Each structure stands twice: as structure tokens, then as C-alpha cells.
Image (cartoon, helix red, strand yellow):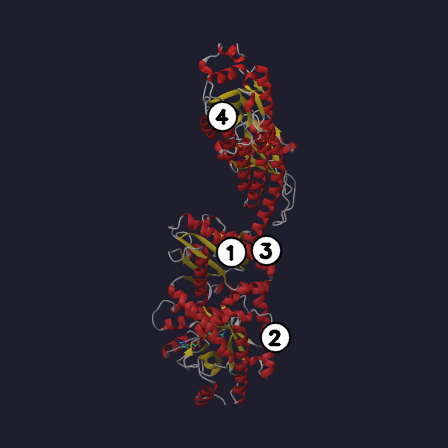
Amino acid sequence: MREQDVFLSFIDDSETLSHPPSGAHQRSWLVLIVDDDRDVHETTEFALSGVLIKDRPLTFLHAYSGAEALDLLRRESTIAVILLDVVMETDDAGLRIIHAIREELGLVNTRIILRTGQPGYAPEIETISRYDINDYKTKNELVRHKLYTTLTTAIRCYDQLCQLDASRRGLAQIIAASNQFILEQGLQTFAEGVIIQIAAFAGIEPDGLVCVSAHSATPTDELTNESTPVDSHPVITAATGRYRHLIQHRLEEIDDPRIIDHLSRCLQERHNLLDERSLTLFFSGHDGYDLAAFVDSSQPLREVDQHLLEVFCVNIALCADNVALVSRLRNYAFVDSLVNLPNRNAFISSIDQRLQEDASQKSVIALVDVDQFAEINDLLGHHYGDQLLCAIARRLAQEKFNHCLIARISGDQFGVFGDARRVRPEMLQSAFTTPFDINGAEHRLSVSMGFARVDPASQRGDELLKDASIALKHAKSGGFGQVAYYSDQVRVETRERTRLLHDLRRAFDHEHLFLVYQPQLSLQDRTVVGVEALLRWRTESGCFIPPDQFIPVAEQSGLIVGIGYWLLRVALHDAVRLRNAGYRGIRMAVNVSAVQFRQPTFLDMVEEALRDTGAGPDDLELEITESVAALGFDYVGNVLRQLKNWGIRVAIDDFGTGFSSLSYLDRLPADRLKIDRSFVSALDSQQPGARIAEIVITLGRKLGMNVLAEGVETALQADMLSQLACNDAQGYYFGKPMPLEDLLHWLHARPGVSS
Ligand code: C2E
Ligand code: MG
Ligand code: MG
């Protein structure tokens, strides 16, 4: 009896499977028998029944022709060994499919054992080496112990090849993962990446994984210059599956003591913990952060995976340092380190992100600019300015702008972006009504604001910011504390202002600016007590541009400093001419803008102009507006006192139209109050405000100041002002502003004026 026949009688047909039940080969070795003789299949399987190789059973797959075998191999790539008959439908059918297995299907790890009934069919040596054939057996060697030995050798070899493969793939994955991590933007994304990678290594779903971070040391934070205390409460930085909701919670809030225990031990003992059902990996960071990741694993990890995970941990720890570094660099690039708000770049990209999420939203961008911040900085020092900016940042970041994006755009400009119902002028203004407390002293601020609405034409952060800054320029051109919304008209006007500034520079250089003088009279005896110097600009085409239009442009650009110095000298020069023409007791009143006033060289400039022109201090009166109060009483008070000491008079111009009014009057040592013409014109027209002139006159007198009414246009106004005991007046009723030659004629023609 042939050897294989001995076994045939024991075969149970039901165990002959052409495909294993699903999942059956998960932990067993797959062995494929390819033979056109059914008996060989049965004998082989029977001979090997119950055998364990490396603690794992065998699962047999069956194919009865070369074509069938290839078909099966196409679907099943984890076959460890193929027992392959050489002679089937053709004499070399078996040899032909080897080529397909290795070259076409790329199954290089699968071991192949050739079998043949006749020794004469042994393959060529060349074939054996070329196709990596493990063994060659005749079919009469199918007895159990011989098969067992052959298969054990082949399976060991297969397993080693697979492990090598896995570690090669694992290393490639580590390198890819590292590259990706370096690009990650923050610890949370990084930690999520770690979880996904671990899951991929362990061959499990990224579910039920937690990653926590904890401070390991007390490093110094370069941004805040504060040392971070040791954190005894690790925080869940990333989590997946059923733990997802725990992100940003503390570790102790996980309702599974086993996980808490593993993670805490891992962080404390600073190494990986592996057990049957879980692995907890430790990632040491050099930058103050350690990471630990917990993975719930239903099956024990293979040794090769454990080694790879060690490599992974070391590598990831290095990456974590890089992430921290990149985060800090990003911080430097996107966070304003003084006020700790996002900067311009961050603001733009956050707006873009919001608009991408929902472009339909009714959002508005606002640019808030502190009026006269440069002056505050110059006068009170940069440290004071910094404190003020931080206080503003805190105000804006307060609750009422909760859902808005807040950023510092540049020096004294802040950006606010959010819902149109929230980002409104009144809302923002109200954030500035309460004075700021700087070192225990109150500081009132006025701000100018530019707004732009999100619309189909402006859908990008940078465009919106540009629109808002055009609107802001427009607002500022109207003076302090103004607001403007962007519109096409505003854009055109802003462009015109830019052109105006350009033309003004030319006009100044080409001496197209000149002064006119408007008389100021005593209401009591109608004598001329002074003249106010007013600037005029006649363009090359001969038309006049009103100072109300070009002075603000000159102020904003700083051009007013040069113009102001020049006109002070011209005015004083003309004052000397008046005196020389015999008109005594006529003071020259010169307007001084706050921009000039805050120049550290302001006093020197006045002194120099007096000296160079030969005018005396009592020839000069300087008109300042209430807006200089924003420069701070200490500074303004000092300058005014110095002027007074020299004998120069100071008038507060346009009184009542500014923002701080009465509260500071007795703190500014001025000589004269000029009632704005809006109150004067209200006098005889029953308009509201008529009583204000009266109140201001009373107030001025009480404070020991001379009071002058501006813009007197009628005899009735002059009479009423006289009756109210207003000292002096100026206006078209008495005389319009006129060039010096005309003024000399006008004075000459007046009865009672000494010449
Ligand atoms: P201001 O200093 O209050 O000057 C008074 C303005 O009222 C002048 O306008 C003057 O022409 C005008 N005015 C005088 N009497 C009457 C009147 O009876 N009725 C009416 N409707 N207006 C009258 P102007 O010259 O157009 O100047 C406007 C503003 O421009 C000035 O207001 C001042 O703030 C500024 N400004 C003018 N010249 C200078 C200057 O040399 N330096 C600076 N810094 N600002 C100047
Ligand atoms: Mg004036
Ligand atoms: Mg005025």
C-alpha cells in the first residue's frame, strides 16, 4: 500500500475547505496546497492535523489547478507557505505560476515548496534560485514528520521575512510621521497625530485613545518671562472615540481608574508601560512638556511592534520639541507680545477662516485708532504708552466683544471683527468712556474708528482691513473721536485727501501759503486789541482751499510742524510791522495745533521766532484747542506756565466744541477763552445753545479769564455780548480776515485807533 493511501481512510470530507471561515486565519499560518490530485490535499491536511508551529495552528487553503491557485492568491496575500505540484494541467504548470506569484503578484515573502510525483521533474537550479523556492520534495515524502520539518523551516523563514518587512514599513512610517509632525501647528494636532500613528502601528482602530501632556520642569516662558509651575494636573491634549469629549479636561476626570493609573504612572516613571490589554507610551519633551498616550489594545502587541514603538517614542519626543519651537515661532509671528493679542497677520487669517466657514454672515470690521497716541508717547514716555495700550487691549478683550476677533494691528490701532450687531460705533465708543487707570492716575482717551462691512466685493481679511483703514483715514480727517464707514465715496474722498496733501507740500515749498489777519476788538470801547493770524492757500489756478480742509491733512502728516514754525515767524514779523506802523497794543494771535504743541522743541521754536523777528512776548498770543488736554495736564501745564512766565498769552480756542470741556479749565493756566461761533450765532436766533455763550462768559470771568466771542456777524450779537459782559469779540461784523496791507488800511480808516 502506498504511504498516502494509509491516511486516506481517516479523512473526514467536511474538513476539506477551499476557503477558511472568515477570521479563522487571523492567528494561524495559512498553507496553500496546489495539486490536481484530491488525494494529495487530503493526505497532506490529515498528516498535519493538530500541528502547531510557533504556537500557532495551520489553516489550509486548496487549489486544484495553476489558474485556481493564482485566483486565490490574488485575494489572499498573507499565505505563509505554498505546497505546489509541478505537474498539473501541463508538465510545467506549477513552475509557470511561480513566476506569476513572485513577479506579478509581488508575493515575495510567501515560501514555496515544490512537489512532484516523479524525481525526473526536478526543477533547474536556476529556477530554484531565481524564484526563491524553499524546498523540493517528492510526493512520497508526505509523511507527518517530514512535512512538519519542512513546513516549520518554511514558516520560520516566512515569519522573519514578514517581520523585516514590518519594521521596514514601520521605519518609513516613522519618518513620514516625523515629517508631518514638524509641520503640525500645535500640541493638540500633534497629539492627535500621535494617537493615529500608534493605532496604525498596533493595527487597531484609533478609538479609545487618550493623550495627556504635563509640565515636566519649570522652564521659563520666553514670551511672558514667567516660570511655569510644575503641573500636577496633566491635561488631556487629544482623545479619540469614547474619550473624545474629555479633550482639554484634566486627567483625573476620566471615569476609568485603570487609564488614570496607567497614564499617571507613565508620566511619573517616565517610561512605557506594556501589558496584555493596553500600552501606555511615554514621550519625553525637553521643552517643559511630557506626553503620555494610552492605547486600549484587545490583542497583545507583537515584539516587532514593541521595538518600533520604542523608536517611535524617541522620535516623537524630538518632534514634540520641534512642535513646541514651531508653536513659539508661530506665536512670535502671530501674537503681539506687548498686549498679548493676535497681530495683523493673525487677524487677517482668522477673518479669512471665519468667512470661509460662513461667508453669508453679516460681519463688520472695525479699526480703532487712539487719537494723539504719538503725542502721549512722546510726552509721557514709551513705558506709559505701553501701559495704556495694554489697558486698551484688556478693555477690548472684555466680555462685550466675546465673540469677536480682537487684534492689535499696529502701534495704536486695534482691530475688531464680528457680528454687525455687536461691532457698532456706540458699542466701541462705550469701551472708552470710562477713563483708563494708569498707575493710579486717570487717563481719558478719544478714539477714531473706521468700519467696513463684509460684502460680495470685500470677502477677504486683507481687503476688509484695507477698506477699514481707508474709512479710518476718512474719520480722522474730520478731527478726533470721529467714525466713518467705508464706501466708494469714502474711497474717492480719501484718494483726494492724499492728493491734497501732495499739493499742500508743493504749495508750502512754492510759497503759495500766506496769512491774513482778522481784527479782535474790545466790546467795551471797540478798540482793536488784537488780530488773529489765519492761514490761506491759493492754488496755482487761483482758487482758495479753506483751512478747515487742509489743516487736518497737514496735522495728520506732520507737515503742520514746518508750516506752523514758518507762519509763526511771518505773523511775528507782521506784528513788528504793525508796531512800527504805530499801532500799539495789538496782539498777534497765532493758532497752534496740538501736533506742534507736543513737539519737544516747541518752546525753543517760539523763543527763536521772537528773537529772530525782534517781536516781544507781549506781542504774541497762542491759541490752542481743548484737544491739547489729551497730552496730559502735567505736560500742558508746564508748557503754558513757561509761556506765561515769558509774558506770552494763551487762549483756548473753539471753547465748548471739544471733548473734555469744563473739567480741566481751572487746571490749564490760560488767559483767554474763545467762545466758539456756533454759540455766538445761537444768541440772536433763539437756537438751543443761546444760553451756552452766557454760561461760558460767566465761567471765564469766574476763573479770572478774558472772554472773546468768535464769529460775531451782527450788531445784535455784539450788543448782547456786551450786555453779558463779554470782554472782546471778533467776526465779520467788525472785520473779515485780510492781508496785512489791507489790515493797515482798515486800521488807518478806523477812528480812534492810534497810529
Ligand atoms: P479758528 O482759529 O477758530 O478761526 C476762526 C475761523 O472763523 C476762521 O476761519 C475765520 O475766518 C472764521 N470767522 C471769523 N469770523 C467769522 C464770522 O463772523 N463768521 C464766520 N462764519 N466765520 C468767521 P478760517 O480762517 O477758515 O479758519 C478755520 C480754522 O482753521 C481756524 O479756526 C483754525 O482752527 C484753523 N486755522 C486757520 N489758520 C490756522 C493756522 O495758521 N494754524 C493752525 N494751526 N490752524 C489754523
Ligand atoms: Mg483760532
Ligand atoms: Mg475758533
Q: Nearer the viewer, mark 2 or mark 1?
A: 1
Q: Any mark on residue 551, and which?
A: none
567, above or below 354, in the image: below
Q: CA distance from mark 4 to mark 1?
A: 79 Å
Amino acid type shown at disc 3:
Asn
Q: Which residue is mark 3?
A: 439
Task: Assess disc 3: are there few (<14), some (14-19) or many (≥20) residues with their C-alpha within 10 Å of its C-alpha.
Answer: few
- The residue lying toward the viewer, choosing from 339 and 524, is 339
Where is residue 331 drawn, in percent x and y? 56, 50
Which element type, helix, strand or loop, lies under badge 1?
A: helix
Taking depth in this image into account, of 19 and 594 the one nearest to the observer is 19
Which marked residue is nearer to the observer: mark 4 or mark 3? Answer: 4
Residue 236 location, x and y as percent? 54, 36
Q: Do the residues under discs 4 and 2 have CB atoms within 8 angstroms?
A: no
For mark 2, give the secondary structure. helix
Quarter of the image for residue 638 reads bottom right
**x then y, percent, for residue 223:** 61, 50
Between label 2 and label 3, give the one nearer the viewer: 2
Q: Residue 94 location, x and y as percent?
A: 50, 26
Count of all numbered marks drawn on residues in the image: 4
